[in-house]
Image (cartoon, grey):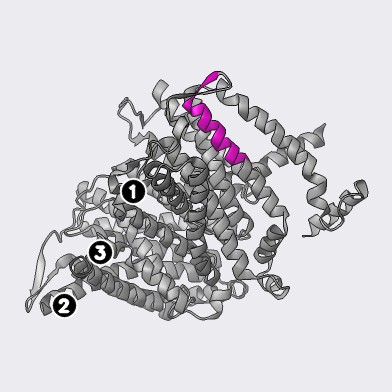
Amino acid sequence: MIEELVQTMVVGLAVGSRIALVAIGFSLVYRTSEVLNFAQGAWLLVGAYLVHHGVQMGLSFGVALVLACGVCAALAALSFRVTVKPMRNQPVFAVILVTVGLLTIARFAVAAAWGTDARNLGDPFAISTVTFGGVTVPVRDLFTIAAAVASVAIIMLLLRGTAFGLAMRATADDREAALVQGVRTDRVVAMSWALAAAFAVVAGVAASAGVSRLGPGIVETSFVALAAVVIGGLDSPGGGAVAAVLLGVSQQLVAVYQPEYVEVLGRNFASIFPYLLLVVVLFVRPYGLAGRAEWWRA
Amino acid sequence: MVASVTQSSTELSVAPESAPERPLPEARRPRLWSLVGVAVVLLAVLPVWLSPFQRAVAITVGFLAIAGAGLNLLTGKAGQISLASALFIGVGAYTAAGLGADRGWPIVLWLPAAFIVAAVVGALLGPAALRVRGNYLAVVTLGALLMGEYLFEQWRSLTGGSTGRSLGGAFGSLDSRSFELAGATFDRDVGWFWLIWAVALLSLVAYRNVVRSAAGRTLQAIHDHRGGAVSLGVSESRTVIAVFAFTSGMAGAAGALYGSYRGFVNPTEFGLVLSLQVLTVIVVGGMATAVGPLLGALVVGALPAAIDSLSRSYDLPGVTGDLGGGGGFITVATLNGLLFGVILVVFLVVEPGGLFRLGSRLIARIRAKS
């Protein structure tokens, strides 16, 4: 009983880490370019399929993962240059629509290239598990948690410890002031898009590795991450990541216990649970749990 | 605001007898009604000339024009982004299913009911829309869409779950293969064409009239400068909730009609792809213009049909036809989805004014040359 609970929490932590990987990307892009880049889901999808393709071609899983991250990062930077950058003077909803359009293009392009049937990612985790004191955890979930922790560490070091990170924070705070100081802001913004895409690829791989299969449905992770960043506050990467982990754990708890105890809510209720939580948070704290109040009126 | 003031002063000098407090709508009315008259005559004779396939396409175009007119008011005019159009289209379709097909209500009851039920659901989104905007609103409406899809799949007694349901019998005489009117026999689809296009014309006129009314100016004021509008006594909450309710009702009516025409609906149809199609309609046509949804609906409705019929008669390179021809890498449905995405992105980046602005620029150039 208690072991089942602990196990659910650990798996939930992995689910939350996966969501957090995408959520950090959302916040990063939002901080530098003030748009919620719906196309994040595209890199999740394209990246996972590229890894699958690479392994099929005979590459090792690690090499395929690094290559997929690089390709998607380059594509994301390109998508910023070609679509969002020329739209500087357009209203924000037009820019959001463009990113939704990019997501659509990616979804159908992936369907054209690889079909919609579930596939095997080709990861080394398979169904192997590790057992600590009666609690069994899939290796895939340990990989996910480790990848999320590593990504957070990378982003912290980058933002706090490098000149590039300083340029990025300056651009996020005041683009024009940064421009005047000689920061090449467009390059910084493009880099933030690239970095966010690489994180999304890791999330996509985590979502389709192990016992999960690779399919078009993994894009849902990015929709849950959207709820997480809004709950956590769009302008706060930390808030978004914390909200993502909490959301993952509670979603997993709902997935395991709701069919048993509150059957009336229907099958697969956990899939919409994040949005219900989002609605509640919006009415209590509209600017998110960690967001600053003035961002709400902007 | 400025443009309307100067325009009304010139109208006043031409027609000084018109009511001074609201001169603009009065002065323009004859031109609008003559346009509507021409459209009515055209639409009355058109379906008889079209082939059955073209008629089906034209009905889809009409459906998209109704849904587009609603979203155009909400997103184009009021600036409220919504990814939830498909939710309201679904609510309308299932209202028609529950009341028309299951309980045998006549269309004069289930069509207004579909409008009202969708409007009530839309009004529920209003309070959320008041708390967030822009980026946040996109997420909230996406969440509403996904929750709606879930609800449709769970509510099996009404929706048939993931297997879908039939809407047969929702519309008495039009459900038979043919019907008689004034001594002549018409095909079922001719009746549906007339019905859907009558509502489409009505929604385009409704869009124009709302925009030119006090309510439209209030919307514009909140869009342009919310603080200023509120300080002048505009009730923001009432306006935003009202516009959500009204435009959702229009989407609901569109869904009720189209679902009944098709005779079959499945919960998975009311997802992000359908919402995106309606968004593409208003972007391609020209946001915040009265004829925009019509132009956009023509493109979005006719393009898949054109590709579909081309793939039947020719062997398009790389495309797998529905008849199983050729070893292509892309199916017609996937190609269509891909094209919507590309069209949406290209128009937003290159010509955000849509076909309307493209057309008016072309006309201006031709006039300048002659």
- Chain containing mark 1: B
Q: Who's the residue at 55% across and 59% down the image?
A: B244
Q: Do the numbered discs 2 and 3 sit on residues whose CB atoms are within 8 Å?
A: no
Q: Which residue is mark 3?
A: A264
Q: Do the numbered discs 1 and 2 sit on residues whose CB atoms are within 8 Å?
A: no
Determine whether A7 is above or below B271 in the image: below
Q: Residue furthest left?
A: A134
* Image quarter of the N terminus of chain B: bottom right
Instruction: Report the side of B173 relative to A110 (left or right).
Output: right
Task: Give, as a single range, the part of the protein colored magenta.
Answer: B184-201
Q: Residues within 10 Å of mark 2 (few under 14, many from 20)?
A: some
Q: Identify residue type, mark 1.
A: Thr
Q: Secondary structure at mark 3?
A: helix
How far from the left and from the top, in percent, is residue A175? 58, 72
- Chain containing mark 3: A
How far from the left and from the top, in percent, is residue B191? 52, 29
Q: Do the numbered discs 1 and 3 sit on residues whose CB atoms are within 8 Å?
A: no
How far from the left and from the top, in percent, is residue A256? 19, 68
Question: B242 or A104, which is in the foreground?
Answer: B242
Q: Secondary structure at mark 1?
A: helix
**Which mark is drawn over residue B205?**
none
Res A188 visible: no
Q: Which residue is mark 1?
A: B159
Determine whether A245 is above or below A220 in the image: below
Q: Who's the residue at 60% across and 25% down the image?
A: B46
- Chain containing mark 2: A
